[in-house]
Image (cartoon, helix red, strand yellow):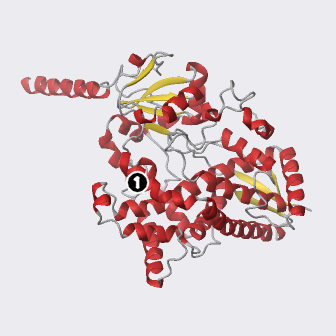
Amino acid sequence: MWILLILIAILCVLIATIIKSGRENYGIIESGNIPVVPPSLFLGSETKLHKEVQHLEDVKRFKKYGGIWGTYLGKSPQVHIADPDLIRLIFVKDFQYFSNRQDIDFGTPVMNEILDYLPGEKWKTVRSLLSPLFTTSKLKNMSDVIASSAQEFIQDLKSEAEKNNGRVKIDCRNRLTAWLIDMFSQTVLGVRMENSKNPNNEFVEAFREMMGENTQFNLLYTLSLTFPFFTRFAPMFNHEPTKLIESAFKQVMENRKKSGSTNSKDFVDLLNSLMEKVDTPEFQNLSITEGTILSQAVNFFLGGYETSGTTLSHLLLELATHPEVQDNLKSELDKMLDRFDGKICHESISDTEMPYALCVLKESLRLAPPLLRPERICTQDWRHPESGVSIKKGTIVMIAAWAANRNPKYWPNPDKFWPERWESAENLNPYAFTTFGHGPRNCIGTRFAYESLKLFLCNLVKEFRVEVRPDTQLNYKMGSTLLVAFDPLYVDLVLRN
């Protein structure tokens, strides 16, 4: 009898401890005059996270709460913003209060050292060392490689279509990410992937496995948000495939060193030069290791192929469902090709030469930002006297990108795909468009992204029309809080003429 009572007492203490631990941060957001998604007993506000499409939930909550609201992701207090004035204040004007991102264990050492999540001075130093890669002259040099790769990819699709009555069915993400990884390999590393024509080659599959493209979020993942112990059983990224990726990058860098050719001053040269500094006091004081440097190569690939693959997949769907936009693009493209002797290149795709193409891209990026919630962590208590809103130190602040980009105050008929709205872009609030983030920690590769997206779009429209298929359907995956994930999306590419 006494043993049973003791066991019951122990169980009660254990339950009380668990509940107390899960609730330890409750009330922090409410004290800042911010509406909150009601939390559960001890699992936070997101008990059904693995059963909900997170970016669509953000849009619903924006409609319910307005431009700012809070949630408890497990025990973590998080503030979501979709108001451009608050975005400007938090991400730009008062950056000193929100200079870092949260410390996340992605489950793999390589991902834990990527640029976006490095702290303070370490981030500042690494970013300043990488920034020269994105100068105008470097971008122009890379543009030639991107243009050649895009043209080759479209020609491969054209050959497939010619064998199939002028039509080819594609799984957008599968085909596009395979091309993008090969394009980044040529642009960043200066090498072609082995078996690059196969969209399921070993290198591509390693990236897909690393990113967990087939991952289904479950209750274990939701529980890990309250009890981090479970994270080791449900990591965000798969560590095993990184071994192949790291090995490939190291081999390219080593081959460059052995060749003695360091005149190109490209990404590989930069990585090798940084490797030579890991023993310097500056790098050691900041804990910049060989792993940190190698992570930036992985990050360049992931930040490029993952987000661009999502963007282009959504773009193809928008083109397929808006044939009039394709007609306008083709008309603009034909006039440009006449002026440039049929050449699609850095100069011919400029914003002045192809303004409508830029409008189409921006509208697609507005409606489907691939990064769901660009975020910062509050490093000291912050208060906005005009609104009465305050945010406590340690609170994570996120831009709800899908909601912010649909704010009807700044985007009339916000769910409509309407590229023409960008023709008067000078009248648009820049902080109402959040796809690339804002402030010092915004996307370092924005110009590269626009360059590669425009080159692909122009080459595609030159040769193909995009059409809806009977099985064309966009189904988003549930549970993802970082990147947009979706099931296979099929469209037809139909040869012109």
Q: Seen from this angle, which residue lies furthest bottom? A: 259
User: In this rendering, is residue 67 above or below 172?
Assistant: above
* Residue that appears at 36% across and 26% down: 381
Drawn side of residue 248 relative to residue 120, left or right:
right
The residue closer to the viewer here, 40 or 495, is 495
> Circle 1 is placed at which residue position?
125
Amino acid, disc 1 = Thr
Q: How many marks?
A: 1
Vertical side of 39 occupied by 394: above or below: below
Q: Is residue 285 rendered to the left or right of residue 74?
A: left
Q: Where is residue 135? Give x, y as percent.
A: 59, 59
Q: Where does the C terminus fall, quadrant-wise?
A: bottom right
Disc 1 element: helix
Residue farthest toward the right in the current orientation of the protein:
497
The residue shown at (29%, 66%) is 279
Q: Looking at the picture, how far across and down is residue 267, in whole percent?
A: 51, 67
Kindly identify the residue that appears in the image at 73 percent across and 60 percent down: 455
Relative height, residue 311 to residue 247 (above, below): above
- State which quadrant residue 362 falls in: top right
Q: Is residue 53 visible?
A: no
